[in-house]
Amino acid sequence: MSQTYKNTSIWDCLSVVVTECRIDRLFQEDPGVLAPLWFGRDPDSEWHFIANCLRVFIAIPLAPIYAFWSYLAAPWRQAVRATVPWKVEWPHVPDAIILEPPSVGHQKFGSRSFANGEYAITNNKPRWLLEVHFKGTSISFERQVPYDGGHPEEAALDLDEFTTRKAIQDSGYIAISYPMKSAIHMYSNEAKRQLDPSSDADRELSLVNRQLIAHTVLECYAEARASIPGKASRVEYIWLDEFCLSDTGLPNGTPDERKEINRQRGLEVGQLVDIFRGAKQVVVFCHEPRCDHTNPGCAWGKRLFTLGEIIHTEEVLQMTRRPGPDGKLVSSITVLPGREFRGSMQARAAKEKQWHLYNIMQHSTNSGSVNWQSAIHSLVVEAIRRDEADGFHMHHMLGKALNGLLPRRSKLEDLQGIDGWADLAWLLELNQGYYNAAALAAVCQTADPWVGEYRWWGRPIRPQEGRERLEPLSTAIPAKFRDEAQKTFQPVLSIIGPKSVEVKHMLRRDDSALFRNPDMRILKIYVICISGFLLFIGPWIGFGNSKLGWSLMYLSCAVLTTSELLVGTIYVKKDGWVVYEDHLSDPIPLLATKDFSYRNMTEWGNRQLIPRWDAPTKHLENPGEDVPRPYRITLVDLQTGVYTKAMVTGRPNNMVILAVHGGGITCMLLQREEKALEARVSVKVGMVNVPPFVLSQSDYSGTVYVGGGALCKKPQQRRVPIPATQSSPAGGAAGSSPPASPAMSRSNQSEDSKNPHSSTPLGSPVSPLPSGSITPTPDTVLPLPSIFPPETNQAPSSSLAIAAVKAHPDADRPAGDTFPIGQVLNPSEAPTSSEDFNPYEVVNRELSQV
């Protein structure tokens, strides 16, 4: 960009006019530049050439009229062109999120009675525990016992229940935290056991099979606890998810019975933070040898529910597997204070540059050192990041994973477990006194084009050195529009009183560059002096020779208008921001052809350590694919010549300022309605970081509502069948001898058996696979059960059945694209477990928000 007042002499100015002036632009403007005309301003207009000729004809032959009109009409013309009424936007009145709790459902349209949302109580206790009798390294007896479900009074308990509660309170209980894929690995690849094929054929993994798999972890704990001094043969009360999320006394035969079991499991999952907070000790475990579980890359450490299970733990039992003398893996336990274990996680997080996890561990070990705005932001972003790492298969559990970690918690029935973004919006609104949602909106990438709701959220970016500062400059509130005509509800993000900047799509030729452009300052002085002199002497000469006097007066106006026309072909108006789509042409050389002063421009980019949201995804596009992908644009500040790059899903016309981010200002790029005065829902098309001087260029806007719908349908993908069990050579089915169904109370059949699994533990078959069955290989990933959502007041639109699953295609996708989220299959079912996820995506699921 040229320096201000660079031309210090009249010869410099004349040299610019001679070399850069384009006479042809007086009749045909360059493509992409609006001409300073009364009509036909667009170069593609059929009236463009006629309007230019009319302007030249009036400007030179009728120079006095043109000069007088230009001076008189300048203020009026400027006012007429300001047609974007964002400053006077009429506000809409949206409904508050917490006006209608999800458990109550939407009230009838026109109803004036509402049930406001309420905060939930804290320090919930588990409803059920496992009473396990250990003898050496084996399990001799186990059963499920009730504990504190519903907080019953002591007088309401019978003698057996009171005795059990007293025993648990005296000894405390142990909670086991583990990744399900580790249990599957040990069950199928190490123990070589088979699943029960006869139960719940409509599910990928039945409750019985999940208990069979989870019991492997309990057996591993029985072996490892022998390494702890004083932990010999004794009774312990243990919380293990698959055995303690529902009442095992309930039958599991009919759909209604399974529905009640799933409802119980869904409610218990929502209070996992309290369950692990109340545990005397927490066992931390994964199947990897020599893993101490403090590495963020650990299978246990990457789980969505890990944060809630470890953040309040008083004492950690670090269960690690190491090769023994015979080469087999032997489990042992190291007892660590919870603060020390979290301190190790904090140190490893800093080493891996996972700063949100670092903040969370710092907040848990030294409460108060991190303010709630920063702590909540780190918790939410880290939870979404873990959700993303798992392919968003646990996305519907996002709210339940965060419930209990934030200052205000939700009632369990208000976390529906259908759409994770809806549950997150509910939690953030409950915590509105502690967190500004504008911070989350400032770090989220654009959503996938097939996402229908909550498009202002998406996969968050990670903080990095020099890019961690995040101070919101506006207030964002999740809300909802009630459409009385359509009788529908539309979730929106209400950004209250933000500053916004208009983004233009075309340049405008500066017909007043002679007077406005600093480079022409010297020429302007000379032209005004010459014209003024001729205009001054014209009347005096006119007294003696009127013809000569009028000629001099006309000449003064002609000099002025001709100079104005010639200089007006050189420069464009240097006001505001303009956007160029990079796939059409290289914007920087293109801009230099329109105005030579943009030949040397400055990029706001890597040297300023600006955050980056999306990356180009052109290599992901398939031939014939009709899916809008994010593409690169260039935003240019015409006043300073500073430009920056961004990725968008559509051409923006507005930037809404959200936060100070790193060394710049983060803005949300929107497509806003330009003509309507009433409130309209804008569409987020991207994010950008711009220099701080944008604050001086911005105007206060009315309340901005961000929403939008899906841009396309989800592309169909190839289906991969579920591996089936083959028949044995003898002709019988491999699963012809299924393992016995697990019972909640069993005795050891032979205490002196040499088989370490000789006890008949709860739901743990010990027979190896038949010779004719397929033995899973280490590369095999067993299909895991689907998560079913709880019952809602709204009937499902269709009856969906579980189809074959396919390998998730997004496991290795780059950072530039977002992952799809599987929507629930059947709204009448509830979530089951904190680790009941599916590493495959069901084909017939409609996609939810990402």
Image (tube, grey):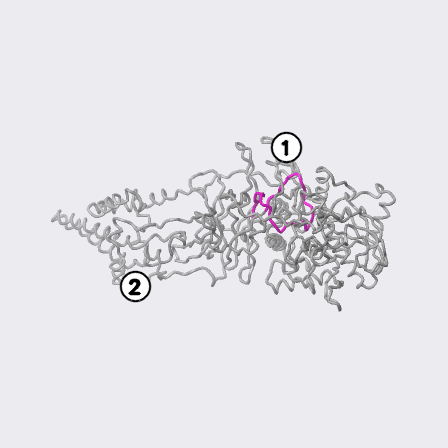
Q: Residues within 10 Å of mark 2 (few under 14, many from 20)?
A: few
**In front: mark 1 or mark 2?**
1
Q: Amino acid at mark 2?
A: Thr
What residue lies at 74% left-to-right and 39% top-to-bottom? 253
Quick check: can you spot residue 103?
yes
Question: Which portion, as a residue range, is magenta?
Answer: 822-850
Name the residue tied to disc 2: 8
Q: Amino acid at mark 1?
A: Ser
**802 over 619 or under it: above or below:** above
**745 over 490 or under it: above or below:** below
Q: Nearer the viewer, residue 25 or 693?
A: 25
Residue 151's x, y, as percent? 78, 44
Residue 89's x, y, as percent? 47, 41
Could you tell me if the residues under marks 1 and 2 are in contact, i.e. CB atoms within 8 Å? no
Q: Nearer the viewer, residue 534 or 488?
A: 488
Q: Earlier in the sequence, mark 1 or mark 2?
A: 2
Instruction: Please identify the quarter of the rendering in which residue 353 is found.
Output: bottom right
Residue 22's x, y, as percent? 26, 54
Q: Residues within 10 Å of mark 1 (few under 14, many from 20)?
A: few
Quick check: can you spot residue 705?
no
Residue placed furthest toward the left: 544
Name the residue tied to disc 1: 113
In the picture, the disc for residue 262 is none
Residue placed furthest toward the right: 159
Disc 2 secondary structure class: loop
